[in-house]
Image (cartoon, grey):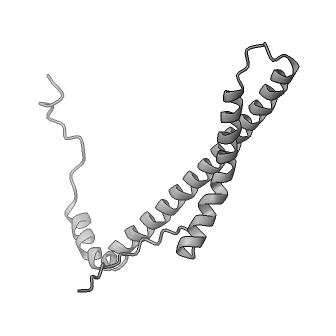
Amino acid sequence: MSAFSSPRRPFPQVRPAAALATLAMTPLLVSQAHAQAIDTIMQQSTGHALGAWAYFLNAFCWIVGSIMLIMCGMGWYQHQRNPNAGSRPGLMVAAGVLGGVLLAFPFLAKTASFTLFNQGPTVTGEQQQMKFDK
């Protein structure tokens, strides 16, 4: 006998009193369960996700930029010790420039957002209507 043709029901029957109690309590719960709660939860979770992304991006820029600057310094030291060792100055200059850009990126992003928009990036979840002039 297969599981689909079993005479047992997987869930017990709902008693008429429980169904009646549920119907009687529904108007009491309607005022508590509204769409604003979902909007607030989504706004908070979006803010947390964007905050986590900002922390990750800052950490990435600091760590990778620092490593690249250290590699640039060590490569330049090796090149000065033995110019024929095969270290290429072009790669060291590129590592120095890229490391400097990565270290400066968090500061540039914050400065640009404060300079251009006079405020930091914020997520409010608020909807706004676009208006066009003639």
- Residue 115 picture quarter: bottom right
Quadrant in the picture for residue 106: bottom right
Rendered-image quadrant of the N terminus: top left
Q: Position of residue 92 (x, y in %)?
A: 71, 30
**Is 110 displayed left or right of 9 in the figure?**
right
Left/right placement of residue 23 relative to residue 88 reads: left
Question: Residue 85's quadrant in the figure?
Answer: top right
Closer-to-camera residue (96/104):
96
Horizontal and vertical percent for residue 104?
Answer: 68, 52
Residue placed at 67% from the left, 38% from the top?
A: 64
Number of on-image labels: 0
Location of residue 130 with respect to 50 vertically, above or below: below
Task: Judge left or right: residue 96 versus residue 123.
Answer: right
At 53% from the left and 67% from the top, the residue drawn is 121
Which residue, as the protein is rendered here, is positioned at the far left?
Answer: 5
> x and y percent of residue 34 in the render?
33, 74
Q: Is residue 64 above or below residue 134?
A: above
* Residue 133 vertical position relative to residue 55 in the rendered view, above or below: below
Visible residue check, residue 82: yes
